[in-house]
């Protein structure tokens, strides 16, 4: 090998090493970037999952709060109707108000409410049905212009108890709602 041959190989070898070094550097950089992006993607995905869970809990809390307000309104109205139905001197006519139908409320209770609220609601609906049957078919007192139920009528006593229980359960459920 002559000096010209050696001097020719030095630039070629250093050029080849430069190309290999550049390719290796690019590969290493891409690998590091990919790992960093994968970690960032996993972190973002976890944050999205946490945000989604928090949003779901907020929506559930809002639905439950709206349900509890509707149940409280319905219960309060039943309490008012019961007071009128047992007062022989009341001038207020006893009629079903324009509120949500109990079956619709029952469906919402089944979806959103706790088991305590569900049990209390079922007892209230049964007591309302019993009191309404008593009002239309049972032992109703009459005077010249109106009718009323005795306050010691078993259906009235049961409905009053169910109303008070429902109001108590709703208060407790609102206090402990997460």
Image (cartoon, rainbow, N blue to C red):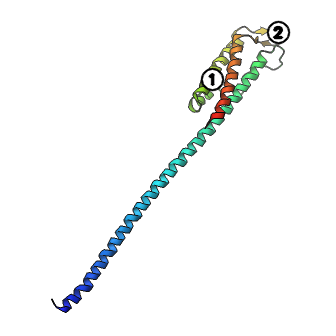
Please tell me which residue lies in front, 15 or 82. Answer: 15
Residue 20 image offset from top left, x and y in percent? 29, 75
Residue beneath the point at 68% across and 31% down: 70
Instruction: Kindly identify which numbered label has been placed on residue 120.
Output: 1
Residue 84 image offset from top left, x and y in percent? 78, 18
Residue beneath the point at 69% across and 29% down: 72
Please tell me which residue lies in front, 101 or 166. Answer: 166
Q: Is residue 162 left or right of residue 107?
A: right
Residue beneath the point at 27% across and 79% down: 16
Is residue 99 visible to us here? no
* Quadrant the C terminus occupies: top right
Q: Earlier in the sequence, mark 2 or mark 1?
A: 1
* Quadrant the N terminus occupies: bottom left
Circle 2 SS class? loop
> Disc 2 vs disc 1: which is toward the camera?
1
Circle 1 SS class? helix
Outermost residue on the left side: it is 1
Residue where numbered disc 2 is placed: 143
* Rendered view: 106 above or below 158: below
* Rendered view: 89 above or below 107: above
Find the distance from the CA under tag 2 to the CA under tag 1.
35 Å
Q: Residues within 10 Å of mark 2 (few under 14, many from 20)?
A: few
Residue 83 image offset from top left, x and y in percent? 77, 19
* Rendered view: 23 above or below 163: below
* Rendered view: 63 above or below 94: below
Residue 130 image offset from top left, x and y in percent? 66, 14
Residue beneath the point at 54% across and 47% down: 52
């Amino acid at each position: 090998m002559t000096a010209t041959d050696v001097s020719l190989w030095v630039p070629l070898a250093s050029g080849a090493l430069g190309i290999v070094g550049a390719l290796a550097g690019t590969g290493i950089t891409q690998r590091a970037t990919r790992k960093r992006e994968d970690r960032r993607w996993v972190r973002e995905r976890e944050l999205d999952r946490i945000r989604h869970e928090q949003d779901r809990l907020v929506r559930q809390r809002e639905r439950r709060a709206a349900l509890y307000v509707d149940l409280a309104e319905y219960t309060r109205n039943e309490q008012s109707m019961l007071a009128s139905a047992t007062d022989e001197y009341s001038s207020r006519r006893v009629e079903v108000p324009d509120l949500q139908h109990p079956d619709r409320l029952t469906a919402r209770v089944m979806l959103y409410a706790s088991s305590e609220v569900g049990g209390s609601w079922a007892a209230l609906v049964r007591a309302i049905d019993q009191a309404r049957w008593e009002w239309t078919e049972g032992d109703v007192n009459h005077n010249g212009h109106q009718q009323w139920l005795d306050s010691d009528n078993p259906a009235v006593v049961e409905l009053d108890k169910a109303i008070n229980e429902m109001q108590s359960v709703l208060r407790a459920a609102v206090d402990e709602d997460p």
